[in-house]
């Protein structure tokens, strides 16, 4: 066996392993799509019914209309966008202060921020729920959005990034008499595109998939987000798997598209911080 | 009469004491900093700092949101630690889940990382595929796995029957199999995330170490065992710490897949908080559970931090 055939063999074996593992990871998704197009009676027939023949596209229109799925979509989108804009803006501003400005108790305050990162969300969720109730904000966008316009994690992430930007550029701007505000908007932000994109994607994903908070602060059908809507759906169509898989597919589609588009930011963000996604 | 300080200022000779406080403040960027920090600080103070303190206070009260709060001292904690059978069970379940899923997800994640750490054509397609479960919503994915686990018509049992297993487990309906089922799904969802971290670690191992080992006649397995694993140990440590923190907070999949059942076999700590607080409106009791959860997570993290020197290899 010469060297060439040996590498060829090695590569083929490696591909074989890759394909086997990929099958394990992806088959559940394929099965979800297949089931979502299946008719109800074919699903409950023994023996593998993999291919949906003929495909029941009606499952999707039905899943969309038996619960107000359009409302779930609008709610999730509005809430996620508000979280992204809010968290990126407030985090970037605070990160600039922590990374570039001198003020008393700066490092102590930053340490306090870091310390709270370790506290599980379940601790704050109870008092914050009571606060929403006192504000009469339950079952409104306010309750879904306002508590998550600020993120200690985002502040931490962006501060670390801003510290890596060389100061020379700002010094030049400072000599020209630029204010901190214009240094922030004209020097720091334009240089931070990848970090901002990473944070934006994390926030979007976290918000789009979040479940416990929207579950407790909403109760009308009109205010549910997609994950909570899915839970409601599950309650109503317990055994109608084609319909449930159609709903799950509808819920997963936007996130998978965002992921495909912004892949490199995901990977970079995770290796940078090791956070999010859990 | 002018004070010493004011006279000094008038003479353009600041006193030492004033310089340390007032002048330092004026020379710092405190004003601008406050503007930059304000929105963030406001949110932090209200929704994090206040909430943490308030949760601590609540844990000493009986609070049901309807009647006035009653101070109960330590009795919430006392009842939880010594008198609540269900709480004991959810603690054990959560530990079972954590110590089942975390090591498995680490091993599988490492294997995936080794597998995709090549320059082969099309490798990014595989990396993308392995990471897909990570970005998917836990709720949607749990609905999907509930169907996969269906004992009569689900894909898993169809496959098991196809390879000759006559009585495959009934998974989510069996108290013994429900937790393993939850763990398998979590490993599937989490492995790609660990893969990304391990992949970064693998690519940081200096090539010359492998070359030296190869000259010394070490085979693939020996190189993996005595170079790759020790060099990856900081990554492994990091993955272990954050995975344990995350696993102790498991909720979404337990609620959707099994709703804690059967016979509370998958009832977890956070589900207990959810039920006590938001189903029975025992806010004080739920807050006490949240603090116990925090203490547990904190102690486990501290423990790992202490003992990392024993196995984590830093250069």
Image (spheres, rainbow, N blue to C red):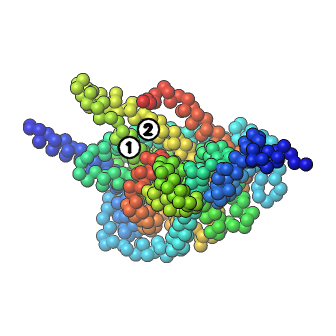
Q: Are marks 2 and 1 in contact (CB under 8 Å)?
A: yes
Instruction: Say which residue appears at 57% left-offset and 54% top-offset.
Output: A96
Residue B69 higher or lower than A60, as above or below? above
Q: Measured from the top left, where is residue A24 in percent x and y?
A: 34, 50
Mark 1, Cα crowd under 10 Å, few <14 / some 14-19 / many 20+, is: some
Q: Taking A155 as reference, is B108 left or right?
A: left
Chain that bears disc 2: B
Residue at the disc numbered 2: B235
| Residue A26 in view (yes/no) | yes
Question: Which of these two is toward me, B291 or A49?
Answer: B291
Instruction: Say which residue appears at 46% left-offset and 28% top-offset.
Output: B311
Is disc 1 placed on a helix, strand or loop?
helix
Question: Which of these two is toward me, B28 or B111?
Answer: B28
Instruction: Say which residue appears at 35% left-offset and 60% top-offset.
Output: A30
Q: Measured from the top left, where is residue B36 in percent x and y?
A: 62, 58
Chain that bears disc 1: B
Q: Taking B204 as reference, is A228 left or right?
A: right
Of callouts 2 and 1, the N-terminal one: 1
């Amino acid at each position: 066996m010469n060297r060439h055939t040996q590498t060829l063999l090695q590569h083929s074996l490696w591909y074989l392993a890759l394909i086997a593992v990929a099958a394990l990871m992806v088959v559940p998704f394929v099965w979800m799509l297949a089931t979502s197009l299946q008719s109800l009676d074919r699903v409950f027939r023994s023996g593998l019914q993999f291919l949906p023949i003929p495909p029941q596209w009606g499952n999707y229109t039905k899943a969309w209309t038996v619960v107000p799925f359009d409302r779930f979509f609008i709610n999730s989108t509005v809430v996620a966008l508000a979280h992204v804009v809010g968290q990126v803006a407030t985090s970037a501003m605070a990160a600039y202060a922590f990374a570039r400005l001198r003020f008393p108790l700066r490092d102590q305050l930053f340490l306090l921020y870091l310390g709270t990162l370790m506290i599980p969300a379940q601790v704050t969720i109870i008092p914050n729920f009571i606060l929403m109730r006192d504000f009469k904000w339950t079952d409104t966008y306010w309750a879904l959005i306002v508590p998550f316009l600020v993120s200690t994690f985002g502040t931490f992430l962006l501060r670390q990034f801003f510290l890596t930007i060389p100061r020379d550029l700002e010094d030049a701007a400072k000599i020209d008499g630029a204010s901190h505000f214009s240094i922030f908007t004209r020097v720091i932000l334009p240089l931070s595109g990848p970090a901002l994109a990473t944070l934006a994607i994390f926030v979007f994903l976290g918000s789009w998939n979040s479940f416990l908070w929207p579950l407790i602060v909403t109760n009308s059908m009109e205010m549910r987000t997609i994950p909570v809507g899915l839970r409601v759906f599950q309650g109503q169509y317990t055994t109608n798997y084609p319909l449930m898989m159609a709903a799950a597919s509808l819920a997963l589609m936007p996130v998978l598209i965002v992921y495909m588009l912004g892949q490199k930011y995901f990977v970079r963000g995770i290796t940078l911080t090791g956070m999010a996604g859990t | 009469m002018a004070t010493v300080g004011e006279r000094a200022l008038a003479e353009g000779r600041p006193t030492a004491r004033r310089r340390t406080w007032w002048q330092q403040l004026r020379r710092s960027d405190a004003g601008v900093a406050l503007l930059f920090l304000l929105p963030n600080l406001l949110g932090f103070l209200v929704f994090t700092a206040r909430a943490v303190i308030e949760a601590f206070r609540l844990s000493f009260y009986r609070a049901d949101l309807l009647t006035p709060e009653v101070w109960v001292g330590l009795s919430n904690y006392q009842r939880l630690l010594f008198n609540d059978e269900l709480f004991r069970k959810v603690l054990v379940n959560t530990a079972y889940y954590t110590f089942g899923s975390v090591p498995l997800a680490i091993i599988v994640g490492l294997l995936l990382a080794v597998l995709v750490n090549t320059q082969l054509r099309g490798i990014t397609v595989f990396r993308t595929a392995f990471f897909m479960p990570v970005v998917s919503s836990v709720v949607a994915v749990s609905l999907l796995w509930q169907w996969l686990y269906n004992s009569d018509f689900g894909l898993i049992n169809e496959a098991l029957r196809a390879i000759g297993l006559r009585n495959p487990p009934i998974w989510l309906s069996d108290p013994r199999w429900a937790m393993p089922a939850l763990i398998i799904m979590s490993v599937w969802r989490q492995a790609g995330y660990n893969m990304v971290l391990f992949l970064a670690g693998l690519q940081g191992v200096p090539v010359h170490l492998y070359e030296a080992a190869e000259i010394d006649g070490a085979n693939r397995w020996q190189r993996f065992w005595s170079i790759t694993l020790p060099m990856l140990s900081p990554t492994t440590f990091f993955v272990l710490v954050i995975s344990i923190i995350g696993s102790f907070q498991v909720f979404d999949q337990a609620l959707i897949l099994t709703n804690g059942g059967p016979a509370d076999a998958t009832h977890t700590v956070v589900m207990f908080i959810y039920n006590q607080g938001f189903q029975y409106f025992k806010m004080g009791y739920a807050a006490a559970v949240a603090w116990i959860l925090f203490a547990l997570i904190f102690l486990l993290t501290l423990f790992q931090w202490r003992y990392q020197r024993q196995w984590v290899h830093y250069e």
